[in-house]
Image: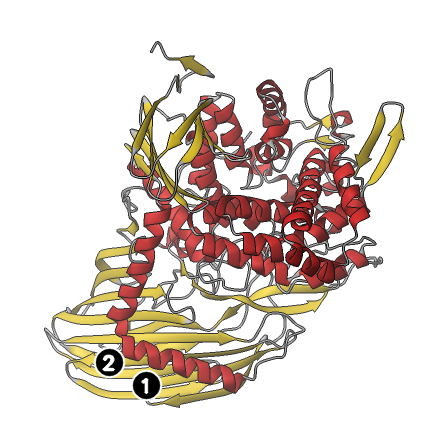
Amino acid sequence: MLQRDIVGLPTSMYPPDEWALVETAWTERYMAVTETIFAISNGYLGLRAVQEEGHPHAERGTLINGLHEQWQIEHAEEAFGFAKTGQTIIPAPDPRRFHLYVDDEILNLASAEVSEYERRLDFRTGQLTRRMTWRLPAGVVVRVTSAAMTSLAQRHLVAMRYDIEVLEGSAPIVISSQLRNEADSRDNAGDPRLADGFDHEVLECVDARADSTRQMLEYTVANSKMTLACAIDHVVEGDHITDMTGHATADRGKLVITADGVEGSRISITKFAAFHTSAVNPSSTVTPTHQLADRCDRTLDRALRTGFDGVAAEQAEYLEDFWDRSDVQIGGNTTVQQAVRWSLFHIIQAAARSDGLGIPAKGLTGSAYEGHYFWDTEIYVLPFLTYTQPRVARNLLQFRHRLLDHARARAVEVGERGALFPWRTITGEEASAYYEAGTAQYHIDSDISYAVDKYARVTGDVEFHHDAGAEILVETARMYASLGFFRETDAGTSFHIHGVTGPDEYTTVVNDNAYTNLMAAKNLADAWKLVTRLREHDREAHLRLIGRTGLRREEVETWRRAARTMYLPYDAAKGITPQDDHFLSLEPWDFEGTPREKYPLLLHFHPLVIYRHQVLKQADVVLAMFLRDECFDDEHIARNFEYYDPLTTGDSSLSTSVQSIIASRIGNASKAIEYFRYGVFMDLADVAGNTSHGVHVAAAGGVWMSIVYGFGGLTDTAERLTFRPRLPSSWDHLHYSLMWQGHRLDVAVERSEVIYQLNSGPDLVIDHEGHSVTLTAGVEERCPITSVWDDQHRGEVESVA
C-alpha cells in the first residue's frame, strides 16, 4: 500500500519526448531533482546535471566509481565481528564549471533575464545539451549553447563544448573554464540512507600545474590513501580573442579567455577532462599520482586527436548498438515510453564502463547509500543486462568473484565456513554498522549465486560458469551448509536457517525466513548440480575447482540433502507462506492511524516499534515467489499476494516491480498497472521524495522486469522460455528483444496476438500459453492471445474468440 501520489514535473516545462528528457524553462524549484534525472555517466565517471555557471542545489557534481574515503566505525557497544571500517564515496573535482562574464556581469540563471531556454538529455547520442539566450540590462544579447558527455567508448574521458554568440550589441567577454575542487559539505540530516560529509580535508593536493591550455591536479585521499589525477585541456576558436592564460592551485585549475565581443562574433570552447584513480582494493599497491597524471595526459592527447565530433560519433555508435539490443517499444503512450527509455538509459550509464567495479545503488548520479554496492545489482539490474548486454553482466559477476577472498574472511569473522559477501561495500569489506539489517541479510550470497546461474543459463557461457561461477557457487553453498542445521522430528528431516534478515528490513533477525530458505535451497542445489556435472564431464575444471576451494565430495552430498529438506514455513489455516516462523504472531500495523507524512516509517519510528508489527518495508515473500515461482502454484501465489500486499508500505523503491509482476501473473490488472506506474515514474515523478540524491538504479532495472516478466509474460525459471503476455489497454503494442544462448529473439505483443521472430541461431522451442512453439530463424510465428485484460476490473476476462 503505497502512500504517495504520482505528480511529476509539469509537462509545460518538461514535455514528453520518446527519445529525450527535455526542459524548456529554468526554475530553481526543480533544480535539485533535475540535477539527478539529467545526469550523465558511463559507469566509471558520473556528472550530476549542475548548471555550468552555477553551484549544486543538492550534491557536488562529479563522482568516480570506487573513489572513497574510509574511517573507523565507532559502535556504541562493541561486539565480536562487527564491521570495522566505514567507506563513503567522495566528490571529485568538477570539470563542467564555466564562469561567463559579459560586460563584467556574471551569468547567474537565478537572476539573469533568460529566454529561448532548452536543456536536453538525448538517449540516442548520450549528450546533455543546453541552449539559451541571455539579455543584459545594457542591451547586449548573447546566445549560450553547451554540450557534455561522459564517453562510453573512452572510459576516463568527459567531452564538453561551450559556445557564446553575440546577437546584439558589443561588450567585453571573459570566460573562466575550470576544474574545481570544493570542500565536502554534505549533511545527511539524520537520514541513514544519505552520505554524510567529513570534518577533515579529504582530497590532499600533491601537485597542481598549468601548461598552456592544459591544467592538471593530483590528489591523495586522506585515509583510504587512494590516489587521483584529473586534468582539463581546451581547443578555443573564435573572433577577437585577446588573451588565454592558464592557472593552477591546490583546488582549482582554470583557463581564462578574454575577447572583444562585437555583434555577430562567436567563441567556441571544446573542453576535455580526464580522470584516473588508483585501485579500489586497499590491499593493492597504490599507484603514484604522477603515473596517473601520465595517463591523464595520454587520455587528453587522444581526445584532442579524435576531436569532439569524433567522440560524439563513438558515443552515438555505442548507443545505437545498445538500443538495437535493449530497446523496449511501447505504442500509444509517449509519457510511459519516455520514462521506460530514460530508465534503460540510466542503467547503461551506471553499468557500461564499470569495468572491474560494481554498480553503486545510485549509480554515479548521487552519493546516497554512500556509493555502496548492494544485492540490488544481482536481483534487479543483472536480468536486463544478462538478456541484452551479456558482456557487461559478465564483468559485474567477475567483480563479485574478485571479492571472494574478502568474503571468505568475512565468513570466518561471523563464525561460518565458505564465503559471506558483504551486505554493503566499496572495497569488498563489510561496511554496514547496523548488523540487524545488514550482515544478518545472509541472502546476499544466494542473490549473487542466483545471478550466476541465470547468467550461465541465458548466455551459455560455459567458461565463466565452470570457472569463476563454480567457485562462487561452492563457497556460498558452503556458507549456507555451515549456517543452517538439520532437525530430526517424527515428521522427518528438515534443514533450518536461524537468525537472519530477509529483504524486508522491517523484520530482522528471525528464524526460517521464507525468502532466505528458498534462495539458499536453490544455491545449494545449483552448487551440487554444477559440481556433479564438472566431476562427470569436465575433469580439468573439476580439479581446478578442488585446488581453489578444497572441495570434498561428502560436503557436496550434504548440500544436496539440505536443498531437498529445506524447511519452508506454511500456515494451513490461512493457506499462505509466513514470511518467517514468527511473523504471523506479530500485531498488525495500524495503517489507518499512520498519517502519510510518517512514511517512510524508518525515519519516524524506533526500529523496535517496527519490528513488533506485521509491516513490510518491501515485498519479501512476493519477491521469493517471483524468483522461485516453480515452488508455488497459482492459487498459492494469489493467496500470498493478497495477504502481503496490504502490509507492504513501499518504503523501498524495490517493491513496486515485483508487486507489478506478481499482480500481472495472477490477473490483478489494476494492481499490476498501478505498481508499474509507481516504478516507472519513481524518479521522474520523485515518488519517494528523494530523487535529488540520485537515480534509483535498481528501480530502473525493475521497470524492465515489470514489462518483460509482467506484461511481456516471460517466465525463465524452467529449461525453456515461457510466455503469457498481457497488454495494458492504454498501450497499442509492446516490443522487446532477448538474447538466449546465442539466439536473438524479438517479441512483439499486439492486442490479440504475439509475433515471435528468431533472428539468428538454430531452431528454438519456446512455450506460449502452455503450448510448445518451434521458432526458425527469419520466420515469424504468430500466436493468439487467448485471454485479455479488463483494466477496470480485477482479474482476467476470457476472450470470446
Counting from the top left corner in percent of width and height, residue 733 is at 31, 30
Question: 26 left or right of 492?
Answer: left
| Residue 359 visible in the current orientation | no
How is the rendered protein coloured?
secondary structure
Counting from the top left corner in percent of width and height, residue 688 is at 51, 42
Give the residue displayed 70% in from the left and 59% down from the top: 543
Rendered position, 120 above or below 556 = below
CA–CA distance in space, label 2 to label 1: 9 Å
Count of residue discs:
2
Work out whether residue 686 or residue 534 is closer to the camera in this orientation and state it: 534
For residue 236, the mark is 2
Amino acid on which the number 2 mark rests in the picture: Val
Give the residue displayed 42% in from the left and 52% down from the top: 346
Identify the residue under disc 1: 213
Question: 471 left or right of 377?
Answer: right
Work out whether residue 385 or residue 688 is closer to the camera in this orientation and state it: 385
Question: 795 left or right of 30?
Answer: right
* Image quarter hosting the N terminus: top right
Question: SS class of the residue under badge 2?
Answer: strand
| Residue 480 visible in the current orientation | yes
Question: SS class of the residue under badge 1?
Answer: loop
Q: Quadrant of residue 711?
A: top left
**Marks 2 and 1 in Cβ contact (< 8 Å):** yes
Rendered position, 564 above or below 751 = below
